[in-house]
């Protein structure tokens, strides 16, 4: 059987309509995965840093930076207060830049603007020892 003349090119039109949606979906999955990886990494870095700070040792910021190797992070350490009790706190921040052009859609979905980076942060709190 042969195709009718009016059916020719229908597949090309369907692909042209669906391809942008599929590309945005794939790019969104890539960026979401990278952002999630960065969030997990800085959460682990905050945990590592607060362990050191809770034991009243120096180098909590260095430990957090080492745990987050490969990421450009900022570390704020609130060490244990003198005396007994209290909590040590380590806050780690990272600015995530979108890898794919889908970052431009973040402004439409509540982001800071067209393709602007998003700020990720993690906080570790642990009771002070000794």
Image: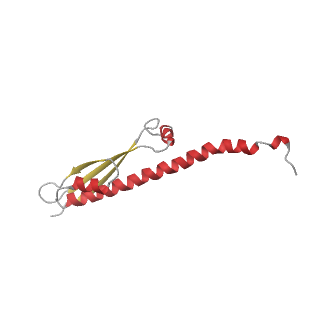
How far across and down, in percent of the image, does residue 126 sit? 25, 59
User: On the rendered structure, is 83 left or right of 98?
Assistant: left
115 over 85 or under it: above or below: above
Q: Nearer the viewer, residue 111 or 71?
A: 71
> Which color scheme does this rendered protein use?
secondary structure
How far across and how far down the image is residue 88, in percent? 22, 56
Q: Quarter holding the C terminus?
A: bottom left
Q: Please tell me which residue is depicted at 28% across the width and 53% down the height of the picture.
A: 65
Q: Which residue is drawn at 84% across and 41% down?
A: 5
Q: Residue at x 67, y 42 (%)?
A: 16
Q: Position of residue 36 (x, y in %)?
A: 43, 53
9 lies left or right of 98: right
Instruction: Name which residue lies at 56% across and 48% down.
Output: 25
User: Between residues 12 and 118, which one lies in front from this camera angle?
Assistant: 12
Q: Position of residue 109 (x, y in %)?
A: 50, 40
Camera-nearest residue between 103 and 3: 3
Q: In this view, does 114 lie to the left or right of 71?
A: right
């Amino acid at each position: 059987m042969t195709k009718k003349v009016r059916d020719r090119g229908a597949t090309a039109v369907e692909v042209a309509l669906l391809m942008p949606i599929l590309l945005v979906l794939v790019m969104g999955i890539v960026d979401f995965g990278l952002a999630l990886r960065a969030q997990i990494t800085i959460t682990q870095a905050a945990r590592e840093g607060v362990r050191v700070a809770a034991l009243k040792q120096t180098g909590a910021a260095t430990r957090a930076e080492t745990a987050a190797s490969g990421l450009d992070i900022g570390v704020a350490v609130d060490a244990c207060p003198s005396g007994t009790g209290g909590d040590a706190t380590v806050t780690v921040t990272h600015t995530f830049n979108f890898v794919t052009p889908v970052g431009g859609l973040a402004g439409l979905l509540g982001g800071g603007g067209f393709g602007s980076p998003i700020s990720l942060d993690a906080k570790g709190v642990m009771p002070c020892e000794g």
